Amino acid sequence: MRRNPHAIFATVTASTLLLGGFALTAAQAAPVKAESLYAPSALVLTVARGEDPLTATVERAVTLTCAPTAEGTHPTPAAACKELAEVQGKFAELTAGPSNRTCTRQWDPVVVTAHGVWQGKPVQFSTTYGNACEMAGNMNDNAVFAF
């Protein structure tokens, strides 16, 4: 049997190019991190002293992520996420209902803010209370801003 060196070289070269092309394609087609089945819910919550959320001095701030699991620097992320889910992320509804707390009328304004994303939609919320007691009473001791 006679060997043709050109045919062998052509076969080896073609095989190398073909296998190299598969390797390159496989490297480029490597799966990217799997997409989440959940819409993102990631928030930064703050409590600040002052009347205006843009100029108030932030005293406390936490992060809260609710999907796929409740986590973040919030002290009780599961409870906070549950409360937000109950009001469908509408922070203003957290203050719905009368307060059972008796507070002084001392003017020492407190601003609470929430910025981020709730179930894939942008969130920007802020409200000002006359003092910390009034804030706690209006929040009905909810976990969301209890940090």
Image (spheres, grey):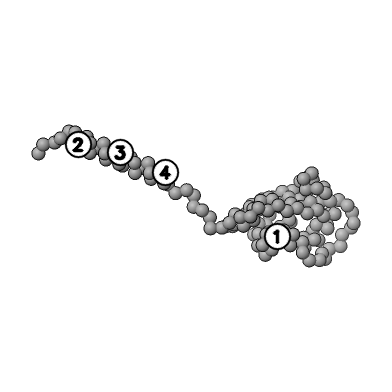
Label 1 Cα neighbours within 10 Å, binned few <14 / some 14-19 / many ≥20: some
Type of the residue with mark 1: Lys
Residue carrying label 2: 8
Spatial CA distance of label 1 from label 4 is 42 Å
Type of the residue with mark 4: Gln
Q: Position of residue 95 (x, y in %)?
A: 77, 61
Residue 79 appears anywhere in the view: no
Label 4 Cα neighbours within 10 Å, binned few <14 / some 14-19 / many ≥20: few
Q: What element carries label 3?
A: helix
In the image, what residue occupies the spot 71% across and 52% down? 124
Spatial CA distance of label 3 from label 4 is 16 Å
- Whichever of callouts 2 and 1 sits on the residue coming sooner in the sequence is 2
- Whichever of callouts 2 and 3 sits on the residue coming sooner in the sequence is 2
Q: Residue furthest top?
A: 5
In the image, what residue occupies the spot 79% across and 44% down? 55
Q: Quarter of the image holding residue 12?
A: top left
Residue 46 appears anywhere in the view: yes
Q: Is mark 4 on a helix, strand or loop?
A: helix
In the image, what residue occupies the spot 70% across and 60% down? 90
Residue carrying label 1: 90
Q: Mark 4 and mark 2 in contact (Cβ < 8 Å)?
A: no
Residue carrying label 3: 17
> Which residue is more in the foreground, 122 or 94?
122
Residue carrying label 4: 28
Lateral position of residue 26 relative to residue 73, left or right: left
Label 3 Cα neighbours within 10 Å, binned few <14 / some 14-19 / many ≥20: few
Spatial CA distance of label 2 from label 1 is 72 Å
Label 2 Cα neighbours within 10 Å, binned few <14 / some 14-19 / many ≥20: few
